[in-house]
Image (spheres, grey):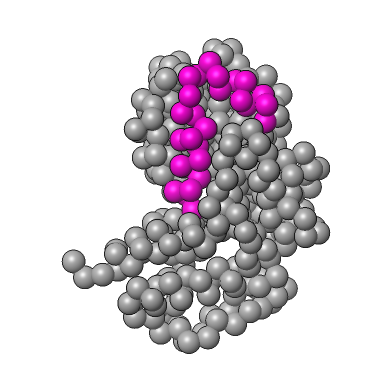
Amino acid sequence: MRALVNGVTGQVGGAILKALSPVVATVSADRATLDLAQPERIAETLDRLNPELIINPAAYTAVDRAEEESEIAFRINADSPGVIAQWAAVHRVPMIHFSTDYVFDGSGTRPWKEGDRPKPLSVYGASKLAGERAIQSAGCSHLIIRTSWVYAAEGKNFLRTISKLAAENRELRIVADQIGAPTSARCIAEIVAAIVNQPIEALAARFAAAGGIVNVATSGETSWHGFAVAIVKGLKARGLPLDVEDIVPIATRDYATRAIRPANSRLDLRRLAAVFGIVPPAWDQALVSELDLVAKDASPQ
């Protein structure tokens, strides 16, 4: 099997490429190779690359900026995944695509199931939902993976931001009334590798058994404040010199953003276990290896 992995310069795409290399033959595609901002060129590129499996974690992820850049957000997150899915349908190529908990409105406290009714609160969430529907309408064999609160030891994400702020400030004020499961790109990549590590002819049946969509996140839950506390505690335990002394919990209303964030980002993981036999690690367990990498990078060589 030859798998095309798009968005390899991103934290999820890069992690997937690394995790898949021992499992299947991979073809990596960055924006110069497969630009989702240019949907009219995608089919030609796919003809040339001729993949047997397509994995698309690439996306427009600037949640706040999307409120003002809805056209490009929808082009990248909805139009282009639809074009990829149409090509995949014609060529009978299975497709894995990534979506988000932002397709839900964040109400209640129950973890979101794959079949719950989406109701996005933001342009970003709406664009990702439109991408899901474009893929479903194309008729290809597909698995849409919804995930949440993605981070990694590198790139731009909450872990890196807190690491930097904690080194420069004595007090941090972090939202405490949004609940979810911080999910490392490494964890996502390992789950994807486990899903695709089978004969390609078996993938369609597994994707269909999942109803074409599955939640992938770490287990357990915390708030952004709880995540920040765990990051700082972990980095201090690894000897990093941090100035921060207080991490103050605040309400969402006290941290203004252009886009509305869902208060409840919990994802139900029972389908992942039932269909694929995968039980993800706890969020704080998965954090350990990422903190090790951050500490290693910060240490003098």
Q: Position of residue 224 (x, y in %)?
A: 60, 68
Q: Is residue 226 left or right of residue 233?
A: right
- The residue at 35%/33% (across/down) is 21
Q: Is residue 25 left or right of residue 69?
A: left
Q: Is residue 167 left or right of residue 136?
A: left
Let me know if residue 198 is in the magenta part: yes
Highlighted range, magenta: 184-210
Q: Which quadrant would the C terminus be assigned to in this image?
A: bottom left
Q: Which of 108/30 is in front?
A: 108
- The residue at 72%/40% (across/down) is 114
Let me know if residue 219 is in the magenta part: no
Q: Which of 80/187 is in front?
A: 187
Is the residue 41 above or below the residue 276 in the image?
Answer: above
- The residue at 70%/48% (across/down) is 268
Name the quadrant containing residue 18.
Answer: top left
Q: Which quadrant would the N terminus be assigned to in this image?
A: top left
Q: Is residue 122 visible?
A: no
Q: Main secondary structure of the magenta part?
A: helix
Is the residue 132 above or below the residue 137 in the image?
Answer: below
Q: Position of residue 245 (x, y in %)?
A: 48, 87
Q: Position of residue 68 (x, y in %)?
A: 64, 53
- The residue at 56%/14% (across/down) is 92
Total numbered badges shown on the rendered structure: 0
Q: Which of 118/188 is in front?
A: 188
Q: Is residue 138 left or right of residue 19?
A: right
Is the residue 114 above or below the residue 102 in the image?
Answer: above
Q: Is residue 198 visible?
A: yes
